[in-house]
Amino acid sequence: MTNPILATHGITKTFGALKACDKVSIELRPGEIHAVIGPNGAGKSTLIKQICGNLTPDAGRIELLGRDVTGLSTQARAGAGLARTFQVSALAMEDTALQNVTLGALGARGGAFSMFRSALNNSALRSTAMDALGRVGLADQAATRTAELSHGQRRQLEIAVALTLKPKAFIMDEPMAGMGAEGSKRMTGFLDRLREQAPILLVEHDMDAVFALADRLSVLVYGKIIATGTVAEIRANAQVRHAYLGGDA
Ligand SMILES: Nc1ncnc2c1ncn2[C@@H]1O[C@H](COP(=O)(O)OP(=O)(O)OP(=O)(O)O)[C@@H](O)[C@H]1O
């Protein structure tokens, strides 16, 4: 089997007496969307925070492209290719779409933030940024102020910023949150195409989106993965139906 792009090996995190993550092992393979689902408080955010470096596991390790990144900072992990999106929007609303992505590309090149205005005229950065905008379908909006973009377009713009870092894996935290039915449908189509750029570890409560997108799902309940499998396997899993999806799922 192909080597995973990202893997956790038995990561565990306790808060006092609570095991929020209990020996969680999960793999993200090339080209796949792997969804992590589970009831509120199951430990999904705790898992993502450990993968991205916002929380240190008590035990276990995290590997990106076979390299142990457990001890690395969030920035070092981002530099190594881990792109987390939708946690907090870092977009500058008064800047254009192109300016926002150019600043992202500047970050990718390790430039000092104070130099950023002159970077907006740097043609290499500009072409990297235009390429990223094109890849998320926002080339026509390059000169549009970010504040004028729709909610869904801003999410696409955040992904364009992430693309300038040449991500090896996307970690997405509820990309459908705050979207209406139409927006969710558009976003689903968008993420379906995005997996060609890098595989996606997806935490999402919108089950229609999850079932439409996920190649594999892992079900987290009380900090433990109770099942990993395809949509069909998970739907048919009696333990999952009992613990999470409800008898009729
Ligand atoms: N910093 C913390 N200190 C203490 N307990 C915490 C902390 N962070 C999370 N928890 C607890 O750990 C458990 C898992 O929380 P977590 O936020 O990871 O769940 P979740 O699956 O992401 O939930 P949701 O779907 O509601 O976002 C919960 O019981 C939560 O109250």
Image (cartoon, rainbow, N blue to C red):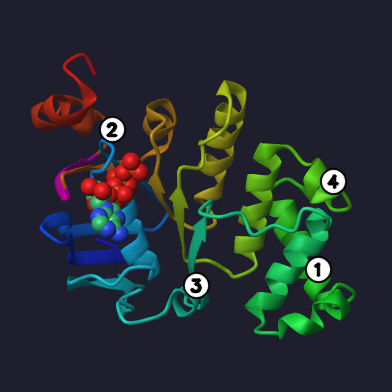
Residue 74 versus residue 115 in the image, above or below: above
Earlier in the chain: of badge 1 and badge 2, it is 1
| Horizontal arrangement in the rendering, residue 9 relative to residue 109 (left or right) | left
Earlier in the chain: of badge 4 and badge 1, it is 1
Q: Which residues are magenta?
A: 223-229
- Residue 140 is labelled as 4
Judging depth in this view, the residue of 16 and 241 nearest the camera is 16
Instruction: Give me the residue at 58% from left, 31% from top.
Output: 179
Residue picked out by circle 2? 231
Circle 2 residues within 10 Å: few <14, some 14–19, many ≥20: some
* Location of residue 130 by image quarter: bottom right
Asked whether mark 3 lies closer than 8 Å to ligand 1, one says no
Dot 2 amino acid type: Val
Please identify the quadrant where the N terminus is shown: bottom left
Q: Secondary structure at mark 4?
A: helix
Circles 4 and 1: CB atoms closer than 8 Å: no
Dot 4 amino acid type: Asp
Residue picked out by circle 1? 127
Query: Which of pointers 3 and 4 indicates the residue nearer the eye?
Result: 3
Residue 239: % across, % down: 9, 31
* 124 falls in the magenta region: no
| Horizontal arrangement in the rendering, residue 42 relative to residue 79 (left or right) | left
Q: Secondary structure at mark 3?
A: helix
Residue 230: % across, % down: 26, 37
Dot 3 amino acid type: Ala
Query: Which of pointers 2 and 3 indicates the residue nearer the eye?
Result: 3
Circle 3 residues within 10 Å: few <14, some 14–19, many ≥20: many
